[in-house]
């Protein structure tokens, strides 16, 4: 029974690691899409100088967002690994569920933060006109 608990705990850690990788890819892809859309939209309405500012601001914001998500996920994976080794399989599953909820909250925060950046940029662009 003890071996089964360790196998389950190891499986939980693997699942969480894979989830981390998927989340990072998703955040990066979404960030790239946002930047491309903004660049295309801005090119048709304002000057090149403002396009450069918009792109730089969004790239910095998205880079920081990804760095925050990665740092949190690395910490979470470390905690889950320790808990999975020490605790029973059931406890590891509960921790994994909490991790998924925490990650979802972080991604929502990143998306909302990106939306705020977009809103500020749009306001600046409108004021420029």
Image (spheres, helix red, strand yellow):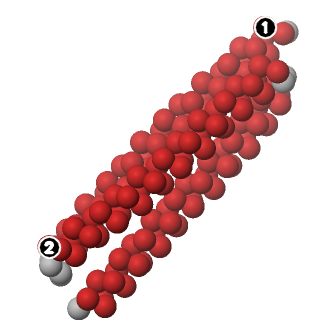
Q: Is residue 57 visible?
A: yes
Asked which quadrant contains residue 127, the reply is: bottom left
Percent coordinates x, y for residue 79 in the rendering:
71, 32
* One can see residue 37 in this view: no
Dot placed on the residue nearer the N-terminal end, 2 or 1: 1
Q: Nearest the camera: 112 or 5?
A: 112
* Left or right of 122, for residue 77: right
Residue 28 lies left or right of residue 101; in this view the side is: left
Query: What x and y, as percent, mark residue 102?
Result: 67, 49
Q: Position of residue 118 (x, y in %)?
A: 39, 73
Residue at 53% across / 31% down in the picture?
Answer: 18
C-alpha gap between disc 2 and disc 1: 62 Å
Left or right of residue 31: residue 109: right
Tell me the residue that label 2 is attached to: 48
Q: Nearer the viewer, residue 90 or 87?
A: 87
Image height of 28 relative to 112, above or below: above
Disc number at residue 3?
A: 1
> Is 60 on the left-hand or right-hand side of 37?
right
The residue sitting at 55% across, 54% down in the picture is: 107
In the picture shown, does residue 122 fall above or below 28?
A: below
Q: Secondary structure at mark 2?
A: helix
């Amino acid at each position: 029974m003890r071996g089964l608990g360790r196998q389950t705990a190891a499986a939980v850690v693997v699942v969480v690691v894979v989830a981390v990788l998927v989340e990072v890819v998703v955040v990066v892809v979404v960030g790239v899409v946002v930047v491309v859309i903004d660049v295309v939209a801005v090119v048709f309405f304002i000057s090149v100088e403002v396009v450069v500012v918009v792109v730089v601001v969004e790239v910095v914001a998205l880079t920081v967002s990804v760095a925050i998500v990665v740092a949190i996920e690395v910490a979470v994976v470390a905690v889950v690994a320790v808990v999975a080794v020490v605790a029973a399989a059931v406890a590891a599953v509960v921790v994994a569920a909490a991790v998924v909820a925490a990650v979802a909250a972080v991604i929502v925060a990143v998306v909302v933060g990106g939306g705020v950046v977009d809103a500020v940029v749009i306001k600046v662009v409108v004021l420029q006109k």
